[in-house]
Every structure is written in C-alpha cells, then in structure tokens.
C-alpha cells in the first residue's frame, strides 16, 4: 500500500514509524485489542476470585489485632505479587518472533516496553480496585482516615498498585529473558517463592539471608501495608489465648504473710484496686452479710489467707458456719450491720493489726490454678495487661505509621519498577542475536 501511494506517502509512513511516541500508541492499541480478543480480560475475574478467598480468611483478624493485621498484610502482598506476576509472564516470550521481525523493520524496543508499561499499569490499577472492593465486601472493615491522603483505602490502593506493578515489571523482564512460554512458566514459581520466603516479615530467616531481603518486592510491600494498617498499635492476642488454654494449670509455691498483705494493699495497681473494691456485704442484718460471705467467689478464693497466728480466712468462715446452727446465732442473726465492708477495708485492718504484724515473716505454702488467679484479678484486666505488654515487646520500627516510612517504601517499590523496566528494555535490545 505504501509503494502504490507515491513517494510522499512512503516518506510519511516511514517517518511515522520512526517516531518513538507514535510507536508507543500503536503498540498500546495492539495490547488493548489483545485484552479484548485474546481473553486477557480473564485476569480481572481471576483477581476477584483470589481476593475473595483471601478476604474470607482475613476478615475476622485484619485491623483487629497485631497478628491478624500482619497476616492480612502479608496475604494482600501475596495477592498483589501473584496478580502482577501472571499479568506479564508470557506477554513477550509468546510473540518473540514477531518482536524480532518488527525490530528489524524499525521498531524501537523502548517504545515497545513503554507501551507495555502503560498497559500493565492500567491492568494493575483495575486489579487493585477489584481486590479492595472484593476484600471489603467479604467483611474486612478498613479504617476511614489515611496518612498520606484523607482516605485510608486510597493510601492502601496506591501501595497495592505499586506492589502489583513492581511484580508485573519483574515478570516482564523474566518474559524478555525466556525464549519460550514453557521456560517462563518454569522460572516463575522460583521467583514467587523467593519473593515470599525472603520477605523478612512472616518467616524467621537465618542471618546469612538478611542481604537477600532488600532484593524482594515483598519486603517493602509488607512493610508499607503493615505500617499503613498501624500494626504496632494493635493488641497482641496470642499470649492471652494461650493463658486461656492454661486456666486449669496448677500453680503453687511459698509466700509470706507480709508479701500477701503488701500485694493486697498496693492501691496503685489497677487490678488490685478492683479486688479491694469488692464489697463483702451490703448494709443490712448480720445474716445478710453472712449469706454474702458464703456465696462470694472472691471470698472463697482467699480462704487460704492468714488472718492472724495460724488462723486463715477459711478457718474463720468454718467457725462461723458452726455457730450458724447454735442458739447464739438465732439470737443475733437479725442484728443490724451499719456499714458495708470491702476486701480493701478488711485487708487494711489486718495489715495494721499487731497480732498479724508479728507473723509477717511466717511462710505458707499455697496451691491454686491459673484460672483462679485470673478470676481474682479480673479476666479482662489480665488479658488487656498481657496484650499491651506483648504488643510493646513486639513493636517493629519498620511498621511504624509515619510519613517517612510510607514514603521510603513507596520509593523503594518505584525504584524496582524502573529497574525491571530498564532491564527488560536492555535485554530485548539483543533480541536480534537469538540463535534461532
């Protein structure tokens, strides 16, 4: 057609195809047609399916506790890397002969790669939007406010696009290296395993592998999602779950009367303060107070406490139980008790009693269960205390929710994108040297 149109048309045709910018749009149009007519659109429902499966796993954990949030962040990184890897793993090697022929006819490799970059960016953005939407409708509740933008979902979307796009460009480079689709698909599992195993977040790695971690896309990817999810400030629940499973474990030892009283008079301890505030009996008759004492689980937990000499609280209660059946009790059980006693008031009275003070160094053996101790202090207080301490011990500076961290990780991912695109371009520049 060009030769039949005259010299002017031939020159216009040649000039148009020597222009790098024009070639970009030509090949971008070709890729969009491929998306429609060669079923590349199937990548989008596949992304939705994978996101749905992951969302159902992480929906009851992510953004609720530290472990669940970190696991959810890692799962989303896996989704992004998976999507990006299979977007472009075959796009170059499946048309290598065509690329070679067109390159010899004047195609610029840089234009060809740049058109792929634009196309793959659109595809990655669509996959990210679908992933976030599907994960949200499966039950994952995203925070509202973001750090870099006013909306958290936009912040997270930017991070996920960069992770997916970096993985996409890595696969594009692998596709430019492989001469056949079979070779590319054989290499891909090893690339994925390297990315996920050496991310440095979920698996504890030996020291010699630390130099490999910065070479993975998953490392800055996991860090940025964990930071944006504010992982460090989520409660650490594994330790409290472990304690719950150990409630029936017996604990015992020796304690002095003074140590017990000192512990129970520590008004600065919130857990002890709650115990001290427990009322032993409401205002009413002596019989009312006695009925409360008999049925109080808190009092029962302190039966082994020594009141004076070798007399324990349990001994005193048993003695009162014997008196209950006497005429003396019948005479006085209706007597009015004018004040409400608390465990704290009783402990303070005992701690100041000279007879008790004389026995502060007496040592007593005790045996109980972990569950009884937890019930005494308060289950919620124990769990909260353990979660806060464990979370503080598990603090990771790389997961801190700061603009500096997020910016650094985004820059790291952008550097990967540029690097792999350049490597793919340089690799294809030598396509004419293929020996086949």
Image: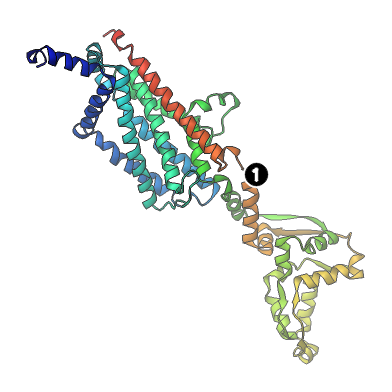
The x, y position of residue 115, in whole percent, is 29, 26
Q: Nearer the viewer, residue 262 or 421?
A: 421
- Residue 140 in the figure: left or right of residue 278: left
Relative depth, front residue between 207 and 280: 207
Where disc 1 sits, the SS reads helix
- From the viewer's side, name the closer residue of 1 and 204: 1
Q: Quadrant of residue 45?
A: top left
Instruction: Give the crowd class for mark 1: few <14, some 14-19, many >=20 residues within 10 Å.
Output: few
Residue at 24% x, 20% y is 95
Q: Is residue 128 left or right of residue 364?
A: left
Q: Residue furthest bottom?
A: 331
- Residue where numbered disc 1 is placed: 393
Q: Which residue is at a point 50% across and 29% down the rendered structure image?
A: 198
Q: Is residue 187 left or right of residue 288?
A: left
Relative image position of residue 361 (x, y in whole percent): 89, 59
Q: Is residue 253 left or right of residue 352?
A: left
Q: Is residue 364 above or below residue 25?
A: below
Q: In the rendered view of the protein, which quadrant contains the N terminus? A: top left
């Amino acid at each position: 057609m060009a030769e039949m149109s005259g010299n002017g048309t031939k020159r216009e045709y040649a000039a148009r195809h020597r222009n790098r910018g024009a070639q970009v749009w030509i090949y971008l149009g070709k890729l969009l047609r491929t998306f429609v007519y060669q079923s590349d659109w199937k990548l989008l429902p596949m992304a939705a399916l994978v996101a749905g499966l992951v969302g159902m796993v992480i929906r009851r954990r992510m953004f609720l506790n530290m472990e669940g949030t970190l696991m959810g962040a890692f799962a989303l990184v896996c989704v992004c890397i998976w999507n990006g890897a299979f977007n472009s793993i075959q796009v170059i090697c499946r048309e290598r002969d065509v690329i070679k022929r067109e390159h010899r006819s004047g195609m610029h490799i840089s234009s060809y790669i740049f058109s792929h970059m634009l196309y793959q960016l659109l595809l990655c953005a669509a996959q990210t939007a679908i992933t976030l939407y599907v994960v949200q409708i499966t039950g994952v509740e995203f925070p509202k406010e973001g750090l870099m933008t006013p909306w958290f979902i936009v912040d997270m979307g930017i991070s996920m696009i960069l992770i997916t796009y970096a993985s996409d460009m890595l696969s594009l480079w692998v596709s430019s290296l492989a001469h056949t689709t079979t070779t590319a698909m054989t290499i891909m599992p090893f690339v994925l395993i390297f990315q996920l195993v050496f991310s440095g977040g979920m698996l504890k790695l030996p020291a010699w592998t630390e130099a490999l971690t910065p070479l993975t896309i998953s490392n800055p990817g996991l860090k940025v999602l964990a930071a944006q999810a504010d992982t460090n400030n989520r409660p650490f629940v594994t330790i409290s779950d472990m304690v719950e499973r150990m409630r029936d474990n017996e604990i015992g030892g020796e304690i002095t009367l003074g140590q017990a009283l000192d512990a129970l008079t520590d008004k600065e301890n919130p857990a002890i303060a709650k115990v001290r505030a427990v009322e032993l009996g409401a205002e009413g008759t002596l019989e009312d107070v006695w009925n409360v004492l008999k049925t109080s689980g808190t009092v029962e937990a302190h039966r082994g406490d020594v009141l004076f000499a070798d007399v324990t609280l349990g001994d005193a209660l048993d003695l009162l139980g014997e008196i209950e059946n006497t005429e003396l009790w019948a005479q006085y059980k209706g007597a009015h008790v004018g004040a409400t006693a608390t465990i704290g008031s009783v402990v303070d009275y005992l701690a100041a009693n000279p007879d008790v003070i004389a026995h502060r160094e007496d040592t007593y053996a005790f045996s109980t269960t972990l569950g009884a101790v937890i019930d005494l202090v308060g289950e919620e207080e124990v769990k909260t205390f353990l979660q806060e301490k464990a979370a503080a011990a598990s603090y990771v500076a790389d997961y801190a929710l700061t603009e500096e961290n997020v910016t650094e990780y985004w820059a790291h991912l952008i550097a990967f994108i540029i690097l792999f695109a350049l490597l793919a371009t340089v690799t294809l520049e030598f396509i004419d040297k293929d020996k086949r």
